[in-house]
């Protein structure tokens, strides 16, 4: 009887350890870490580090000091995203790979062979406020439903973005990211855009 009890206890401990080990691994197979970013103000970028799991600071679009820094991996301004790459940096080696439709956060366990990472570019866009020029990634927190002419449906209809793989600023690590929220409820009960949530895990 004592041997049976000891065996069951040992088996339970082994299973518990195996479960914890799986959840704490960095092979992309865990449930990930959830992050909330209050990027509700247009023109302000929130800079985030995956390695440190924290927001490093907030800066206006005109603040170029962050181009010199390599401690941030992504930045968020409402639905726009920056990676520490291309025109957003002087030396960063970040970038983004957009996963194919049908790829889920859970199913993605490694960087696909031959994956090409896109760098940030400076773009000029025309909107209700006229022309604006900014530097950003092709990745976005959400996507917009388009009409037959390729224009945004108005009022906007938000669609989920695909799963992304972001390369770290130093180019040594890769993180899968799923954006799960763009809008939240404010203190007055109204819907607020830019209350971003995402889940990430190292691959």
Image: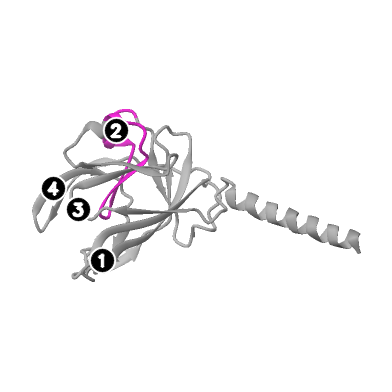
> Residue 169 appears in which quarter of the rendering?
top left
Residue at the (24%, 65%) spot, across then down: 186
Marks 2 and 1, Cα distance to the nearest angstrom?
31 Å
Q: Is residue 69 magenta?
A: yes
Residue bounds of the magenta highlight: 68-91
Question: Which residue is label 1 attached to?
Answer: 146
Q: Nearer the viewer, residue 83 or 131?
A: 83
Question: Which residue is label 4 attached to?
Answer: 132
Does the residue at mark 3 contact the one at mark 1 (Cβ under 8 Å)?
no
Residue at the (19%, 36%) spot, across then down: 63
Marks 3 and 4, Cα distance to the nearest angstrom?
16 Å
Residue 23's tag is none
Residue 41's tag is 3
Closer to the N terminus: mark 4 or mark 2? 2
Q: Secondary structure at mark 2?
A: loop
Closer to the N terminus: mark 3 or mark 4? 3
Residue 89's tag is 2
Closer to the N terminus: mark 2 or mark 3? 3
Foreground tag (4 vs 1) = 4
Foreground tag (3 vs 1) = 3
């Amino acid at each position: 009887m004592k041997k049976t009890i000891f065996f069951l206890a040992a088996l339970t401990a082994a299973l518990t350890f195996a479960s914890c080990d799986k959840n704490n691994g960095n092979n992309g197979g865990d449930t990930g870490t959830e992050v909330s970013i209050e990027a509700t103000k247009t023109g302000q970028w929130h800079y985030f580090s995956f390695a440190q799991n924290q927001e490093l600071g907030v800066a206006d679009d005109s603040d170029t000091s962050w181009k010199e820094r390599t401690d941030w991996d992504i930045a968020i301004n409402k639905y726009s995203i920056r990676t520490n790459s291309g025109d957003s940096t002087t030396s960063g080696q970040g970038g983004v790979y957009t996963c194919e439709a049908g790829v889920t956060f859970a199913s993605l366990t490694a960087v696909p062979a031959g994956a090409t990472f896109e760098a940030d570019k400076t773009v000029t866009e025309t909107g209700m406020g006229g022309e604006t020029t900014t530097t950003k990634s092709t990745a976005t927190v959400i996507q917009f439903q388009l009409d037959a002419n390729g224009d945004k449906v108005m009022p906007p209809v938000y669609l989920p973005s695909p799963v992304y793989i972001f390369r770290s600023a130093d180019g040594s690590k890769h993180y899968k990211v799923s954006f799960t929220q763009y809008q939240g409820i404010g203190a007055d009960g109204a819907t607020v855009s830019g209350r971003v949530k995402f889940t990430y895990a190292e691959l």
